[in-house]
Image (cartoon, rainbow, N blue to C red):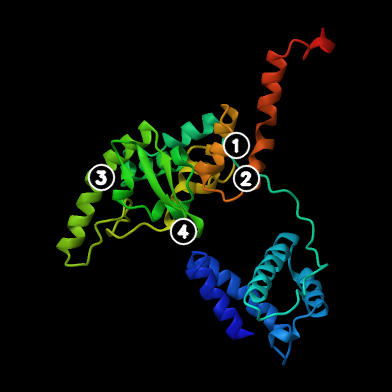
């Protein structure tokens, strides 16, 4: 079983282009399943009975969403084994995962978003960098992992587009608003000084990253998450603000302003339209207001 999991992990990384973090998650879930098989950990020992026993054990210590994730990892693994003819029959036939409550994305109002973008001030050592990060996250809707992996060369200042490499190593071009472009321009001189200081300390430098930490190295996702949360608190926003909340805000505000779902899907880098559709319910209040104002019979019962 362990050898098959290793082959599957290599396939996810090399053929599917999954990140090391994602592959590690799959491997962890599959090794957990293998451990429930006891002494006989061969692929042949996988059966509907052993899978059902595994799912029952998961329910004892995990929520529905976690059970679904682990079962999904197992399904993908089984499809790989069937395709490679390592397994003759599907042991997951007839086994369904639990129902999961629909996830409601957290997003900011337009006013809250503008308040957040204006929060970095002169008292902040990295005001220019932080403002550029906030502007770019909201302007493009990209994931924090995509943001910190961007290089200066990925941003075309003339055409105002950013090259983003997302999940599955898929590349997309995303338009960038003028405020974000200008914010990045304002950050670049400080970025260059940080690189020069790092070189002056005889430390190896990587001149490519768009965003740097105080030591002149590439900024991490964790650092950006802490920074965004801190500015959200300073702005007086009641909910916890995360980079993903800005991504959700980007999508929600576009839909509220009339963008079509397919375009938002492309901008977000979603592989499936169904993933983007979870944002549609967030705009129902807005659509109801438009309907009430525009439809001639919308308020007929009130008059």
Q: Give the residue at mark 1.
A: 261
Q: Of callouts 3 and 1, which one flags the residue occurring earlier in the amino acid sequence?
A: 3
Q: How many marks?
A: 4
User: How far is mark 3 from mark 1, CA to CA?
Assistant: 34 Å
Q: Give the residue at mark 3.
A: 188
Q: Give the residue at mark 4.
A: 169
User: How far is mark 4 from mark 2, CA to CA?
Assistant: 18 Å
Label 1: which secondary element: helix
- Residue at point 68% right, 64% down? 69
Residue 5 x %, y % = 60, 79
Please state which of residues 277 and 232 is positioned toward the viewer in this rendering. 277
Badge 1: few (under 14), some or many (20 or more) residues near its Cα, within 10 Å? some
Q: Give the residue at mark 2.
A: 273
Find out whether the residues at labels 2 and 1 contact each other: C-beta distance under 8 Å: yes
- Residue at point 22% right, 67% down? 204
Of circles 3 and 1, the one toward us is: 1
Q: Does residue 213 lie above or below 242 as drawn?
A: below
Q: Of callouts 2 and 1, which one flags the residue occurring earlier in the amino acid sequence?
A: 1
Badge 4: few (under 14), some or many (20 or more) residues near its Cα, within 10 Å? few
Q: Does residue 27 lie above or below 117 as drawn?
A: below
User: How far is mark 4 from mark 3, CA to CA?
Assistant: 27 Å
Instruction: Indicate the quadrant where residue 36 lies.
Output: bottom right
Q: Of callouts 4 and 1, which one flags the residue occurring earlier in the amino acid sequence?
A: 4
Badge 3: few (under 14), some or many (20 or more) residues near its Cα, within 10 Å? some
Badge 2: few (under 14), some or many (20 or more) residues near its Cα, within 10 Å? few
């Amino acid at each position: 079983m362990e050898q098959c999991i290793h082959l599957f992990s290599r396939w996810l990384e090399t053929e599917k282009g999954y990140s090391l973090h994602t592959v590690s998650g799959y491997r962890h879930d599959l090794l957990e399943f293998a451990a429930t098989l006891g002494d006989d950990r061969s692929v042949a020992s996988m059966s509907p009975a052993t899978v059902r026993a595994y799912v029952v054990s998961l329910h004892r210590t995990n929520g529905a969403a976690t059970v679904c994730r682990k079962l999904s990892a197992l399904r993908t693994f089984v499809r790989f084994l069937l395709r490679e003819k390592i397994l003759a029959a599907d042991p997951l036939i007839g086994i369904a995962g639990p129902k999961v409550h629909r996830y409601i994305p957290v997003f900011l109002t337009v006013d809250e978003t503008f308040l957040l973008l204006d929060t970095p001030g002169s008292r902040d050592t990295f005001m220019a960098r932080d403002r550029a990060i906030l502007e770019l996250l909201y302007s493009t809707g990209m994931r924090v992992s995509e943001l910190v992996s961007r290089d200066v060369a990925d941003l075309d200042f003339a055409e105002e587009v950013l090259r983003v490499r997302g999940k599955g190593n898929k590349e997309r071009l995303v338009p960038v608003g003028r405020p974000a472009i200008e914010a990045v321009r304002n950050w670049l001189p400080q970025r260059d000084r940080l690189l020069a200081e790092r070189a002056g300390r005889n430390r190896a430098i990587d001149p490519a990253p768009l965003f740097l930490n105080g030591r002149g190295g590439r900024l991490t996702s964790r650092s950006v998450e802490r920074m965004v949360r801190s500015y959200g608190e300073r702005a007086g926003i009641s909910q916890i603000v995360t980079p993903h909340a800005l991504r959700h805000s980007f999508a929600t505000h576009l839909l509220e302003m009339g963008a079509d779902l397919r375009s938002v899907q492309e901008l977000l880098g979603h592989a499936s339209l169904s993933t983007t559709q979870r944002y549609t319910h967030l705009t129902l209040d807005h659509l109801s207001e438009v309907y009430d104002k525009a439809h001639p019979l919308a308020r007929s019962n009130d008059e």
